Amino acid sequence: MHCESPIKRRKSRQIMVGNVPVGGDAPISVQSMTNTETTDVAATVAQIQRIQLAGADIVRVSVPSMDAAEAFGEIRKQVNIPLVADIHFDYKIALRVADLGVDCLRINPGNIGREDRVRAVVDKARDLNIPIRIGVNAGSLEKDLQKKYGEPTPDALVESALRHVEILDALNFHNFKVSVKASDVFMAVAAYRKLATQIEQPLHLGITEAGVLRAGTVKSAVGLGALLMDGIGDTIRISLAADPVEEIKVGWDLLRSLKLRSKGVNFIACPSCSRQNFDVIKTMNELEARVEDITTPIDVAVIGCIVNGPGEAKEADLGLTGGTPNNLVYVDGEPNHKIGNENLVDNLEKLIRAKVAQKAIQMAEDEKNIIARA
């Protein structure tokens, strides 16, 4: 039922963010960023745990002060997901969070100041095997680049990124990833495409400040989708003015749609029309909310009538086609049994969970056989 993506990914050097590989042949990781006050340890830990439960691989935390750095140390002790510290300008904060167990530093070396400060951060990162993310943003380009280009452009973003890369190269430090984000889709896509040809390090993708949930999701899907289809991108963050959990959901939906990663229930559902034999939209809203905890990849088709229903159901692990007087359930592409509209969501949930349990057993057996043959 699941098929491999036809996308040929760009070859990049692999780095490790905690226990998560980024780049190379590693799966594209999904990340988000907390929006709590970092000094509120309890609130930040709670949010990180919700983000992780939604499927995040990595979480970024803003660390704007030394008080926030100390709080970060407490947060680090209470969560088990790789954490990136977002730091601007103050090299002492970077040194402190490095000692407190950070898994990646988001700090632009060109903004730290004197060469000795840059070297101190790089030496610390090298000693503790901590990668750095160079994060260029169209809204905070260097003043001389603003003057040179007149306004943010793809070339300005790339030139800024390469300045920071050159600093790390001069210090023989190659354990880094790069982002060149803009809120303008065309600018971001052009910048990433250009940068992808000039460095070997992994790329962190994002359309920065994309907007509120619906509009930001669309902008991110257009921009990141174009890049991912080009094979560009090793880790993604969907930037939404919304609950960070929504960023993770959108990120996973994007990767699933391109067959780049599989996790949880992938629903194929019709938009519904007067042919429907049950309320598809109401059914899907209830069903999706009930099965958010499932992580085993499974394709489920829910189609309201017999026009497209059988074709979609035959391609899914589990399918439901609306019919009169009863709806037809498909299992592994074959007609299996019929169910009525009464308690439809309850019955569908039971079918999904039973199929997931069966798939989990099969996946465990397959893994055991692979290990035995190795």
Image (cartoon, helix red, strand yellow):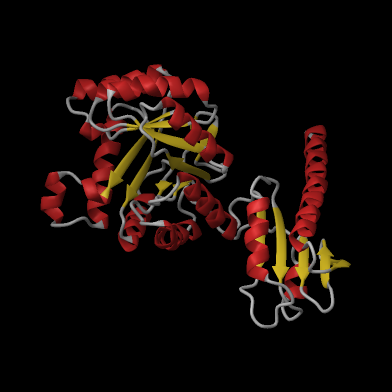
Q: Nearer the viewer, residue 328 or 172?
A: 328
- Residue 123 in view, yes or no: no
Q: Which residue is pictured at 83% across the width and 47% down the height?
A: 358
Q: Nearer the viewer, residue 326 or 117?
A: 326
Q: Quadrant of residue 163?
A: top left
Give the quadrant of the N terminus: bottom right
Q: Which residue is pictured at 64% across the width and 49% down the height?
A: 292
Extreme-front residue of the structure: 342
Q: Which residue is pictured at 52% across the width and 26% down the height?
A: 79
Count of picture labels = 0
Residue 291 percent location from the top left of the image? 68, 51
Q: Nearer the viewer, residue 280 or 178?
A: 280
In the rendered structure, the answer to whether residue 257 lies left or right of residue 225 reads: right
In the rendered structure, the answer to whether residue 153 lies left or right of residue 343 reads: left
In the rendered structure, the answer to whether residue 237 lies left or right of residue 321 reads: left
Residue 148 percent location from the top left of the image? 12, 52
Give the quadrant of the C terminus: top right
Residue 294 percent location from the top left of the image? 68, 46
Q: Nearer the viewer, residue 70 or 92?
A: 70
Q: Which residue is pictured at 27% across the width and 56% down the height?
A: 154
Extreme-right residue of the structure: 337
In the rendered structure, the answer to whether residue 145 lies left or right of residue 134 reads: left
Placement of 81 over or under 180, stated as above or below: above
Placement of 306 over or under 120, stated as above or below: below
Placement of 147 over or under 310, stated as above or below: above
- Residue 92 in view, yes or no: yes
Residue 166 percent location from the top left of the image? 27, 36
